[in-house]
Image (spheres, grey):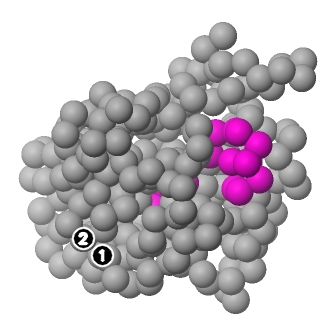
Amino acid sequence: MRVAVVENMRNTGLGALATALDEAKADIEWFRVWRDGILPPDISAHDALVVLGGEQSALDDETHPYLPKLARLARRFGDAGKAVLGICLGSQILARAYGADNHLGTAREFGWHRIGVTAEGRTDPLLSALGDDFTIFEWHADTFSLPEGAVRLAASPIAENQAFRIGRAVYGTQFHFEADMRVVEEWKADFPDTITRIAPGWLESHAELAARHGAAADSAGLTIARAWVGLIERQEAGLLSPASA
């Protein structure tokens, strides 16, 4: 199983998704576009695409000129029936790729939040094991309209498009399900000034909040990660076969 991972910002990490990909014995190839702007040249070398979060917006083409190419690449993966996963900024780039609008600075959420699962989400492979709602980590200010043909899977009062699916296995999640407690600890250490600016007092409350919400969020995140990895189909001898085969 060959998975391309696009890292839009240093130190974003895979967290729970790394666990699920390791369980599936996936071969991960990193594309650190924040450093060199290099993306996969086409879709042929990988069975799936992951687009991680970042501090930029999905429309910051002037400062991040690879963004239009990344949106087109994600669309090609999806149109070919391959599994695609966009997390936070990645979900916003997916929305752009499929013709939706990005709304900048209109939906700030940070920390562990409760997310509601829609009726469609309760029957979708990604979220069906989580019940009516779940706790997960958020870090975003932007949001997007739902792409045409997409199915809304999860919502919150601040950002109604928390998760969506297009086709068989193209998924965007506004929330950071990959951000388990270890990843959150790393972000806390790496970005203290940013966190203090957007969420005053959170650093001081982190230990209490992690004790209250971390285990449930980690469990939900790993469930989501395993569900998405289970949807990856691997190319073998010109044929698509389930990852579990």
Q: CA distance from mark 2 to mark 1?
A: 7 Å
Q: Position of residue 159 (x, y in %)?
A: 30, 68
Mark 2 or mark 1, earlier in chain = 1
User: According to the image, label 1 marks what residue?
Assistant: 108
Q: Secondary structure at mark 2?
A: loop
Locate residue 119, reporting x and y percent: 28, 42
* 115 magenta-colored: no
Which image quarter: residue 120? Answer: top left
Q: Which residues are magenta?
A: 74-88
Quadrant of the frame with the C terminus: top right
In the image, is 35 to the left or to the right of 140? right
Q: Residue most toward the bottom?
A: 62
Looking at the picture, which amino acid does disc 1 mark?
A: Arg
Q: Nearer the viewer, residue 20 or 241?
A: 241
For disc 2, the neighbor class at 10 Å (few under 14, some 14 to 19, many from 20) is few
What residue lies at 71% left-to-right and 39% top-to-bottom?
Answer: 81
Label 1 Cα crowd, 10 Å radius (few <14 / some 14-19 / many 20+): some
Which of the two marks, 2 or 1, is nearer to us in this view?
2
Residue 106 position in % (x across, y down):
34, 83
Mark count = 2
Q: Is residue 52 visible?
A: no
Specify the amino acid type for callout 2. Ile
Q: Quadrant of residue 244?
A: top right
Where residue 115 appears, as percent x and y from the top left, is 23, 52
Q: Which mark is residue 158?
A: 2
Q: Check if residue 82 falls in the magenta segment.
A: yes
Regarding residue 199, the answer to whether it shows in the image is yes
Residue at far top of view: 245
Q: Is residue 43 left or right of residue 186?
A: right
Q: Quadrant of residue 52?
A: bottom right
